[in-house]
Amino acid sequence: MKVSGFTFIRNGSLLGYPFIESILSALPICDEFIVAVGDSEDDTLERIQAIGSNKIRIIQTQWNEKMQDRGFVYAQQKMIAQYNCTGDWAFYLEGDEVLHEDDLPKIRASMEEHLNNPKVEALAFDYHHFFGSPDWVAISPAWYRQECRIIRNTIRSWAPDGLYFVVMDKNKKGRYPRAALVDAPIYHYGHVRSVEAMRKKNERIGKYWKHDHPLFNGYQIDPQALKKFSGNHPKIVKPWLENEAEKNFTPNQNHSLTKREIKHRLAMKLEFIFGRELNKKHFTLIS
């Protein structure tokens, strides 16, 4: 079995991504790792080159600045990396997603287990979405609780955005992949970067959705959408958390709810009553 890791990144240092930690966390279970590196204003390329692994294959890319339709430029960069994978499985990690070292054997074992079962087209992970600081995780239906990150590399698939995959059974119609769950989470740190880094990110990415993000003045969220994190962070990301992550965050009990947050608070109550998750899934679960 051959496993291809892949990702894309641009201005990773400037915008506060733990992208080196992300790559390093997956490298032990990958036979190759493809990185689409966009033209950057910082040392992103040099830092990836400095990893010094012969598993890593760098593709330098030019982003289409005219592509400003619902973030599709992210999908373009994701697919550049994906379509250069040569393994049986293609394992995608975003630049702010990290694997725990304790989970690597079971992730590799899951790929081995399903390798010869064509009914399983993808493997999905649970998620820890950290918010505000490394001490808090988001739990409301506003956040995807599970997502495919491993896709079979022998089927026709593409990415309509950076988040998920679509399988093309027919030329004119796609569907979400059929997936099995991996008994392991993804650690998502995109919403704990420093306030300064998050402000820079929001200032730069809004144009790819054809709008301007409001000025970021700090992490704000419905306090009922958070819970304390009781687990252990991956060892590889702990220095980044210590030196780069935001720490001065406390949920604001007087936070003024948005209409969206009111809807999700109601959804959480319904989930509790009926015992069913109401968040959207981009895959069909195979039991």
Image (spheres, grey):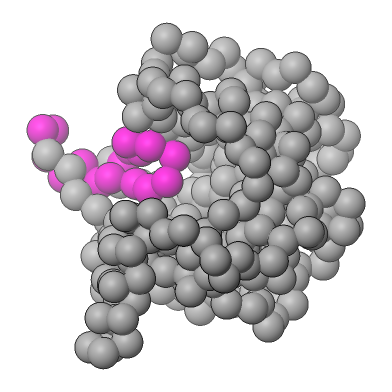
Task: Give 21 or 261, whichever is nearer the viewer.
Answer: 261
Residue 156 position (above or below residue 275): above
**Left or right placement of residue 243 versus residue 193 in this view:** right
Q: Which x, y percent locates residue 158?
A: 33, 37
Q: Residue furthest top?
A: 66
- Quarter occupied by residue 174: top left
| Residue 170, magenta (yes or no) | yes
**Left or right placement of residue 18 versus residue 59 in this view:** right
Residue 87 in sight from this viewpoint: yes
Residue 118 in sight from this viewpoint: no
Q: Which x, y percent locates residue 1?
A: 53, 59
Residue 240 position (above or below residue 229): above
- Quarter occupied by residue 160: top left
- Residue at 28% in and 72% down: 267
Residue 72 position (above or below residue 62): below
| Residue 134, magenta (yes or no) | no
Task: Give 88 or 34, whichever is nearer the viewer.
Answer: 34
- Residue at 57% in and 70% down: 253
Q: Which x, y percent locates residue 274?
A: 23, 88
Residue 230 position (above or below residue 45): below
- Residue at 84% in and 62% down: 238
**Left or right placement of residue 63 versus residue 25 in this view:** left
Task: Give 53 or 166, whichever is nearer the viewer.
Answer: 166
Q: Which x, y percent locates residue 187?
A: 62, 63
How many discs appear? 0
Residue stretch in magenta: 157-172
